[in-house]
Image (cartoon, rainbow, N blue to C red):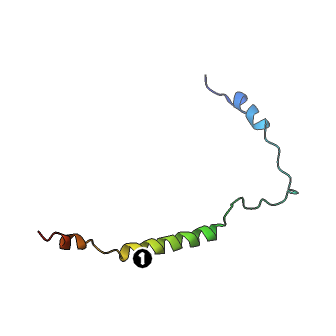
Amino acid sequence: MYDTPSTYSNSYLKSTPMKSDKEAPKTSSRLIPLWVQFVFFLAVAAFLYLVFSNMETNESLKGIDNS
């Protein structure tokens, strides 16, 4: 029902083996570096800003209605 100190203390004895320090340092597993992703994001954001800021309203439809 309840875990007593004698029942759950055995789980501390089963520790995972420590990794040795002799292993090579883990290199980044990113396919594209983070700074390249950030620069690409800024370029896309700037492009979208320029597109949306230079959009014109469609006023030519008002001129078509001549009747």
Which residue, as the protein is rendered here, is positioned at the far front? 67
Answer few, some or many: residues within 10 Å of disc 1's Cα (few below 14, many 20 plus, some between 14 and 19).
few
Q: Position of residue 35 (x, y in %)?
A: 63, 71
- At 16% across and 69% down in the image, what residue appears? 65
- At 72% across and 61% down in the image, what residue appears? 28
Direction from residue 20 to residue 44 in the image, left or right: left
Identify which residue, 8 or 33, lies in the foreground. Answer: 33
Name the amino acid, label 1.
Leu
Which residue, as the protein is rendered here, is positioned at the far top? 1
Q: Position of residue 11 (x, y in %)?
A: 74, 34
Q: On the image, which quarter does residue 56 sit in?
A: bottom left
Q: On the image, which quarter does residue 54 sit in?
A: bottom left
Direction from residue 56 to residue 41 in the image, left or right: right
Q: Which residue is mark 1?
A: 50
Question: Where is 3 relative to 61, above or below?
Answer: above
Identify which residue, 64 or 28, lies in the foreground. Answer: 64
Quadrant showing the C terminus: bottom left
Which residue, as the protein is rendered here, is positioned at the far left? 67
Q: Position of residue 42 (x, y in %)?
A: 52, 73
- At 66% across and 67% down in the image, what residue appears? 33
Identify which residue, 1 or 35, lies in the foreground. Answer: 35
